[in-house]
Amino acid sequence: MKKWLVGLLVLLGPSMAAAQATVPEIPFDGDINFLKMPPDIHLGEVSGVAVNSKGHIFIYHRGSSAGGPAYAATASQLFEFGPDGKFIREIGKGLYAWSYAHTVRVDKEDNIWAIDKGSDMIIKFNPEGRVVMVFGRKKEASDEAEPWTRVTPVRPHVDGQFRQPTDVAWDTQGNIFISDGYINSRVAKFTKDGDWVKSWGERGTKDGELNTPHSIANDAKGNIYVADRGNRRIQVFDPDGKHLRTMTIDVPVPPTAKPWFGNQPTPEGATAQSGAPWAICISPGPTQYLYSADAFPGRIYKLTLDGKVVGMLGRSGHQAKQFGWIHEIACPSENTLFVGELLNWRMQKLTLKPTAGGTK
């Protein structure tokens, strides 16, 4: 019996003794029909969602442009929608960098940044939708262009070269931070003009080391928050790469929780464990909050910037207010979230309704 109990607690994450106090559920509405899609356009896996200062919504997905063989097909497409969800345009149709969509971000000047895991490239578009800056380089089609693979020991880092990058963020000076991602497990820093500065991080488990930095965000002070998914934690750095703190989300899993598909996660599968951060974003305003999503049990957590979990919402599933692998979150305000879901092929608008004395 004791062995069984220990195994159960390990499966649920850190021990119940170390888990945080009871975390309240945040009431919310979920709109899965917010986007008004043209009749001849369909979404595939929505890997990216971002919102600009005018309330326009950008969707980066693996869908309508898919071409090629069943394996190693090209799958990237970037759409813009109005604040009312009405389709406006496709950006970068047929772009050379399009290969396998990962995330999209919008900076404070409303430039649009697309991070393509398949081509190892990060593309900056101006608000008009023209390419103005390029980071990384796609493998040449004239060569045997095979994707990067994980090897031991890891390949040496190369300044300015990416191997399956994942996301981008900025500090108060406009410096650019790219999470580089599945293979390199590091953060790369550039100036606002695109000049290489430095990188930090190696694959590992110590503070400052990373294992699949999958999402990245910045607060109003310019600190950089890295969703260290493979290590089931969020690490915070200053703009120079100094490690400031590490946060973990240790909320018990309901005994009835089921994954969207597949077997129950095991302690060895950190990517799918409760609290492992797939997507993070930080809300604006005088009091900022960090939102983080996991794949199992498929929840979104609301945290203070020092790592206290103050609320949570949702679970895995196919219906509205349920989630199928949230891959990116946009949080233009504390109580309005847009989430891109891989498995349900959709973007869902969430309106949070915190109660007095609850998460506010």
Image (cartoon, grey):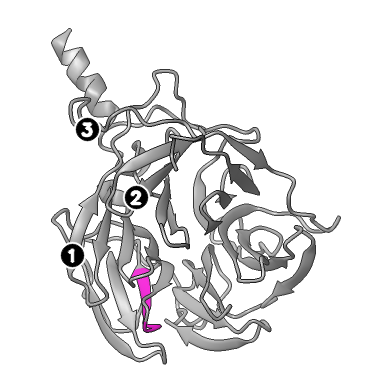
| Nearer to me, 73 or 119 | 119
Question: Disc 1 or disc 2, which is closer to the eye?
Answer: 2
**Label 1 – label 3 distance at C-alpha:** 23 Å
Q: Is residue 247 left or right of residue 346?
A: left
| Nearer to me, 199 or 360 | 360
Give the structural element (helix, strand or loop) at label 1: strand
Report the span colored magenta: 173-179
**Label 3 – label 2 distance at C-alpha:** 20 Å
Q: Is residue 202 above or below residue 42?
A: below
Disc 2 target residue: 304
Ranked by sequence position, the earlier of labels 3 and 2 is 3
Disc 3 target residue: 14
Q: Residue at x 29, y 60 (%)?
A: 150
Give the structural element (helix, strand or loop) at label 3: loop
Disc 1 target residue: 243
Farthest residue, direction front: 356
- Confirm whether the magenta stretch covers residue 64: no
Label 1: few (<14), some (14–19) or many (≥20) C-alpha neighbours in 10 Å: some
